């Protein structure tokens, strides 16, 4: 079997739900502002090569990417059930296993993108941790040779260690947060105006909070994930509840799109005009 190289941190099955009628996405990359708003295929966006690969002693382990692919397959069915029900004005009535799949998908989508990871990882902290590890090794076993020290302190070695640490941290199951999500319900927002839509970003999950409230599960904390151009899902602090709401005005839509743009490096959607409006409003 071929080892997967292109690791999509935003699943293609999610991206396809934001495409225009031609099956393409309008996107903007803050790292390449000279390109402006452009059009691209889902498979060509929101990926990095070997992003979930651990490499040790020349051997590449892509098991996390394989796991994410399997989870995305399960989540795709749950998301389709949510979208179909919400568009018909009905509750999806997720089973207990389906809700667990959704919670797991939301949790990992919240933490697995480069924009989510970069906000938590500190280069200075890594350097300090590496230095402490070297000191502890020498105290417990023996001094490093000059060649070992050169290799360990080389930028190539440190980059590989950082990447491996990042991948392993990304794969952590986060049972505490999953328990919190399991105790919460879901609110599904539906956009009915044909000329309005949600965008998706490289920071796929965004948190909207009231002043002074930041903890997941508090009444003023909303954690949103758009799952289609007309559907977004929020975790709400009511176990087992499923709330479907039609957006009567554009306030939530604008707030969510603005937050996604603000926190993401890349945004995409089905409307060129919408992406352009977010870029021009910055």
Image (cartoon, grey):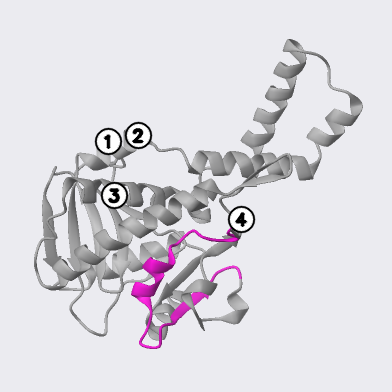
Horizontal side of residue 278 vs 155, given as left or right: left
Q: Marks 2/3: CA distance? A: 14 Å
Q: Are marks 1 and 3 in contact (CB under 8 Å)?
A: no
Q: Circle 4 sits on which residue?
A: 50
Please identify, in this view, whether the residue under mark 2 or under mark 3 is nearer the observer: 3
Residue at 18%, 78% (x, y): give it: 192
Placement of the C terminus among the 4 image quadrants: bottom left
Q: Circle 1 sits on which residue?
A: 179
Residue at 9%, 65% (x, y): give it: 90
Q: List x then y, in percent, for residue 73.
A: 36, 59
Q: Marks 4/1: CA distance? A: 30 Å
Q: Circle 3 sits on which residue?
A: 101
In the image, residue 103 lies in the stretch drawn in magenta:
no
Please identify, in this view, whether the residue under mark 1 or under mark 3 is nearer the observer: 3
Q: Circle 2 sits on which residue?
A: 175
Q: Marks 4/2: CA distance? A: 26 Å
How many residues crowd mark 3 within 10 Å: few (<14), some (14–19), many (20+)? many
Please identify, in this view, whether the residue under mark 4 or under mark 1 is nearer the observer: 4
In the image, residue 17 lies in the stretch drawn in magenta:
yes
Please identify, in this view, whether the residue under mark 4 or under mark 2 is nearer the observer: 4
SS for dot 2: helix
| Residue projecting furthest to the left | 90
Q: Are marks 1 and 2 in contact (CB under 8 Å)?
A: yes
Q: List x then y, in percent, for residue 49.
A: 62, 60
SS for dot 1: helix
| Residue projecting furthest to the front | 1
Residue at 51%, 47% (x, y): give it: 64
Q: Are marks 4 and 2 in contact (CB under 8 Å)?
A: no
Q: Nearer the viewer, residue 25 or 271?
A: 25
Horizontal side of residue 98 vs 264, given as left or right: left
């Amino acid at each position: 079997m071929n080892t997967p190289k292109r690791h999509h941190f935003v699943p293609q099955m999610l991206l396809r739900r934001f495409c225009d009628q031609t099956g393409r996405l309008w996107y903007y990359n803050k790292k390449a502002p000279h390109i402006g708003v452009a059009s691209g295929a889902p498979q060509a966006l929101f990926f990095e090569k070997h992003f979930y690969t651990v490499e040790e002693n020349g051997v590449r382990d892509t098991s996390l990417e394989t796991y994410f692919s399997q989870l995305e397959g399960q989540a795709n069915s749950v998301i389709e059930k949510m979208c179909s029900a919400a568009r018909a004005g009905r509750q999806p009535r997720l089973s207990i296993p389906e809700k667990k799949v959704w919670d797991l998908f939301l949790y990992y989508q919240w933490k697995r993108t480069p924009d989510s990871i970069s906000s938590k990882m500190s280069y200075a902290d890594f350097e300090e941790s590496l230095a402490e590890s070297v000191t502890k090794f020498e105290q417990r076993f023996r001094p490093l040779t000059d060649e070992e020290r050169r290799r360990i302190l080389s930028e190539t070695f440190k980059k590989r260690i950082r990447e491996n640490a990042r991948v392993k941290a990304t794969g952590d199951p986060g049972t505490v947060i999953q328990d919190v999500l399991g105790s919460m319900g879901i609110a599904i927002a539906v956009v009915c105006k044909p000329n309005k839509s949600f965008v998706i970003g490289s920071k796929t999950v965004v948190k909207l909070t009231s002043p002074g409230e930041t903890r997941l599960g508090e009444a003023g904390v909303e954690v949103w994930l758009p799952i289609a151009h007309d559907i977004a899902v929020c975790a709400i602090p009511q176990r087992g509840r499923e709330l479907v709401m039609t957006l009567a005005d554009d306030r939530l839509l604008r707030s969510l799109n603005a937050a996604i743009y603000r926190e993401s490096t890349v945004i995409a959607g089905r409307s060129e005009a919408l992406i352009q409006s977010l870029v021009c409003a910055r």
